Amino acid sequence: MTHALLEAADLHKSFGGDGWFTKRQPVHAVRGVSIAVRPSETLGIVGESGSGKSTLARMLVGLETPDSGTIRMEGHAVAKRRSLDFHRQVQFVFQDASSALNPRKTIRRILEDPLNHLLGLTRSRRRERVEELMALVHLRPEFLDRYPHEFSGGQAQRIGIARALAAKPRLIVLDEPVSALDVSIQAQILLLLKKLQQEFGLAYVFISHDLAVVETLCDRVAVMRNGEIVEQAPRTTLFSQPRHPYTKTLLASVPGGLADTATA
Ligand SMILES: Nc1ncnc2c1ncn2[C@@H]1O[C@H](COP(=O)(O)OP(=O)(O)OP(=O)(O)O)[C@@H](O)[C@H]1O
């Protein structure tokens, strides 16, 4: 039997509700979510702000601990405290690349860090790898000795992607990776992600509130609302024959219809 690369079953996560003086109600950010990502595919998670997408993404990579539910990697249960091997295989790309990069480190050090921690390569091989990574995301090697604040949003996101690629992962979870960028830059980053996926057989979990972006990149799409997945289907099915009323509302609310941004 072939297992999914990463599989989550019945994940729950609440926040708050533990105020000492105030009787705060807990926020049920994620309620009984199950998803599976296969090797080399892109699973889109779409939904409005506050629907629980980021919380789900953060649980998948181990930045947040589920209250209950299980996560499996190739059929093996993943421990609460993720192993180094898990972190090598599953990487995360943040929405706000500029603030996700350590401002006190040069790009070279930012890209070398995952190599130091995970692979134990020789110094010369690390140098080579860092230059390879810059080439993969189409940035000039001269940029390696600069600091994050010297880059535009799009360039910073390329560096975030390079950092995620450093340790040769199999899956990258991307949390709204293009939402902070201008549309033309978005298209370039989406094309880059597609190219990298083809080259390395990467799987992606792609979180977005933007249906046009999801349609461009994803093979399957899960629609989240109020912490739950209300519908999950192959992209073409979801966009041509949405079943859930909420999916229909989301599709109807896209201004000007769905443009294929990556081919624009
Ligand atoms: N660390 C936290 N502490 C308290 N509440 C949180 C925390 N993280 C998320 N929440 C709450 O959980 C719910 C889901 O948030 P989440 O960020 O996962 O949604 P989202 O769909 O990613 O939204 P957005 O696109 O705005 O980030 C929201 O009500 C949010 O306020």
Image (cartoon, rainbow, N blue to C red):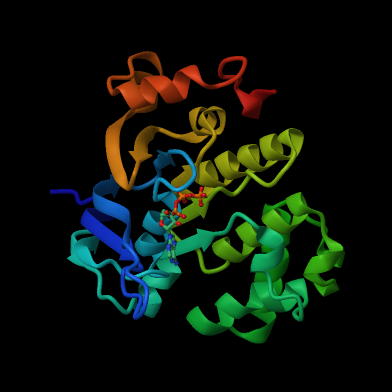
Lateral position of residue 29 relative to residue 134, left or right: left
The answer, for residue 5, to whether it is visible in the render is no
**In what quadrant does ligand 1 lie?**
bottom left
Q: How many numbered discs?
A: 0
Q: Is residue 53 left or right of residue 187?
A: left
Query: Residue 14 location in percent, x, y?
Result: 31, 63
Counting from the top left corner in percent of width and height, residue 145 is at: 84, 74
Please identify the quarter of the rendering in which residue 132 is found: bottom right
In the foreground, 252 or 259: 252
Residue 234: in sight, yes or no?
yes
Q: Residue furthest left?
A: 1
Q: Position of residue 108 (x, y in %)?
A: 74, 75
Q: Residue at x 32, y 70 (%)?
A: 65
Answer above or below: position of 230 versus 105. above
Image quarter of residue 66? bottom left
- The structure residue drawn at horizontal position 72% and vertical position 34%, both measured from the top left corner, is 183
Front position in the image: 10 or 8: 10
In front of the other: 202 or 51: 51
Answer left or right for 168 relative to 238: right
**What residue is drawn where x is 58% and y is 67%?**
166
Pick the quarter of the image with the C terminus: top right
Q: Can you say whether 202 is above or below 159 in the image?
A: above
Q: Is residue 211 left or right of residue 59?
A: right
- Residue 60 or residue 53, whichever sits in front: 53
Residue 18: which quarter of the image?
bottom left
Rendered view: 240 above or below 36: above
| Coordinates of residue 75 in the picture (x, y in percent) | 18, 59
